[in-house]
Amino acid sequence: MLTDSTQDPVTADRVGLDRFAAAATAHGEITTDEGVLTERGRDFWGVGGVAGLLVRPHGRDDIAPLMRLATEHNVPIVPRGGASNCSGGMMPTAGRVLLDLTGLDRILDIDAENRCARVEPGVINSDLQAALEPYGLCFSPDPVSAHLATVAGNIIENAGGPHALKYGVTYNHVLSVDAVLPDGSTATFRADDDGPDLLGVLIGSEGTLCVITEATVALRPIAEVTHSLMGAFASAREAADTIAAIIATGVVPAAVEWLDRAGIAGLQQFYDTGYPLDADSIVLIDVDGTAAGVARDQPIVERVLREHATEVRIAEDEKDRAALWYGRLNAPNSVVQSGKGFFIGDVTVPRDRIPEMQEAIQSTAARHADGLLFIAVCGHAGDGDLHPTTFYDKDNPLAAAALEAANGEIIEAALELGGTITGEHGVGTEKIQFMTKRFTPVEIAVQRSIKTAFDPAAVLNPGVMLPEQSPAEPDVNAFGVAVRAALTRSLAIDPTAKLTTGGNTDISVNLENLSVVVGADATVEQIERYLDEQGVTCAAVPVSNPERTIGEVVATASGEERIQVRHALLGADVTVVDDQHQARFGAETMKDVAGYDTKRLYIGAHGAFGALRTLIFKVTVRA
């Protein structure tokens, strides 16, 4: 659960902190005021700590010298953006410096013709959206915290939001970042760089690998028309099957949101959701696009809903749409205003396992009814990302133990269903103890080697994401050496390196989840034939050179092929450099921000990090 990390040993001594402060005045405004440090040191949920001092850089060019000073004086740096994080990802202590980036909030350029924008790290998501609106454009990531979250915060957490089903998560919309590494060196990481996808590793890294100083993000046109529909269902299974049936038609809704019976009834205590109280689950759906496109797609969605739902509502104007969505979007505010104790969880499962996950959550609530009031399940059903929100009486002496036990049981259930411990909130400090349940010692060791390659002095956001080192973790130093070589642009291609291993040519499509699991030694021709029989396509499967294995495609990807692989890849079973250790990074889940996104290193790496055994991709219904 969320705790202040006051016991973390990675801190600076007072002499080092004072020397840093004296030198840092040339590059930023220094604050030691206790009130400011307390207020700025906590996230939206009130979790955090008090730093030894706070520095606000004069400009983005001052971040590099500040990081060099931090390394020189062995002073840990904790970056701070909008502080909307809810996983305890910002933990300043007396021996650390809080690097406040909120003043770096300029929108540097909006290129409407090329649909991109350059921004400083502290630009608030909703401010960017407002600036883009006159151009008829938007930045796709739209977390509920958009009024607080910065663009750099979106990037380091790989933010999603309700509309990630159709438009993707932050990863899919970042073209490049300028970054300062922990030693004060600078680098630019681009989505179209050949070789290992280092940008992909930085995205979702929770401020532990670099400080972003500038980002160029992709934009899209604001949909001409958006209509909303609601379906109420007698069971979670019927709701999930209906979502699968809608997507199987080839229509990709802009959003598919979920709220269960306990959530509707529980939230009704705090405000009028307007939702039917006799439904086991409700699903909210946005259909957007051109007027012609919505006119084509909406009747299809409505037809499928009416075949299965006990009630269907349609909202086509903004007033009706706002009323329909109010109950779901007002949930976070109502939670805070309820006066009750609460904890907002975040787990992701493959979309077709949502009913089992909902059942597991409510079984957990029943087991801990002596300490908890109820657990409301809401979330992004289109990509399986659920937010079980647990309510309890603050004066109940049984609440703390019940909350901790319930959270653990929910995460265990998600893992058993092929899911992950966090879809978009991040690991932070809240879920560190679950990292060893999600990952094997090999996989933890590999991620630790990534952190060491980027931050050998461990000065950047220490104590976040990775658990304490275990004796069970093997020596994967060669992996870290390869990461460092990629980082310094000195990674050499070894023509003798194995690209695939295991000889696996199996292919299996999960139509309800719209994912495909393929053996790395299956050929492009074999995969394309199989996908065609299933009525789906995969952007990562190229049309040229069909004799190639899909593992070869991923390992040698460049140019347009690499871009397609980046956006379609969900997971990979791999070996680690010397073929002695096996690991899995990613899964069939559409959202996953547990740990470093290590699978990205295998893209275009020509086997430098190890060979590929199995790959998991997104698929789409063939038009």
Image (spheres, rainbow, N blue to C red):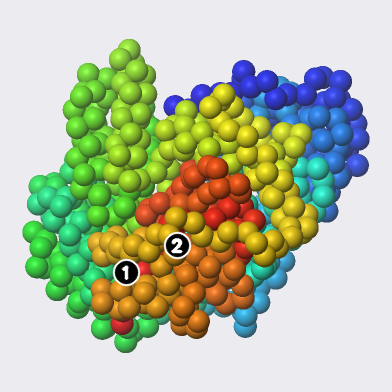
Task: List the single residue furthest toward the top.
Answer: 397
Q: Quadrant of the N terminus?
A: top left
Q: Residue at the location (30% across, 39% down)?
A: 416
Task: List the single residue furthest toward the bottom.
Answer: 292
Query: In screen coordinates, is 213 left or right of 590?
Result: right
Q: Residue at the location (91% across, 42% down)?
A: 26
Q: Which residue is mark 1?
A: 253
Tell me if residue 417 can be seen. Answer: yes
Query: In screen coordinates, is 479 left or right of 395?
Result: right
Instruction: Give the residue type at disc 1.
Output: Pro
Image position, residue 456 (x, y; %):
75, 37
Tell me if residue 126 can be seen. Answer: no
Q: Quadrant of the C terminus?
A: bottom left
Q: Which residue is mark 2?
A: 520
Q: Residue at the location (73% across, 49% down)?
A: 484
Viewer-nearest residue: 350 or 257: 350
| Mark 2: secondary structure | loop
Q: Examine the rendered structure and indicate whether residue 375 appears above or below residue 214.
A: above
Image position, residue 337 (x, y; %):
38, 36
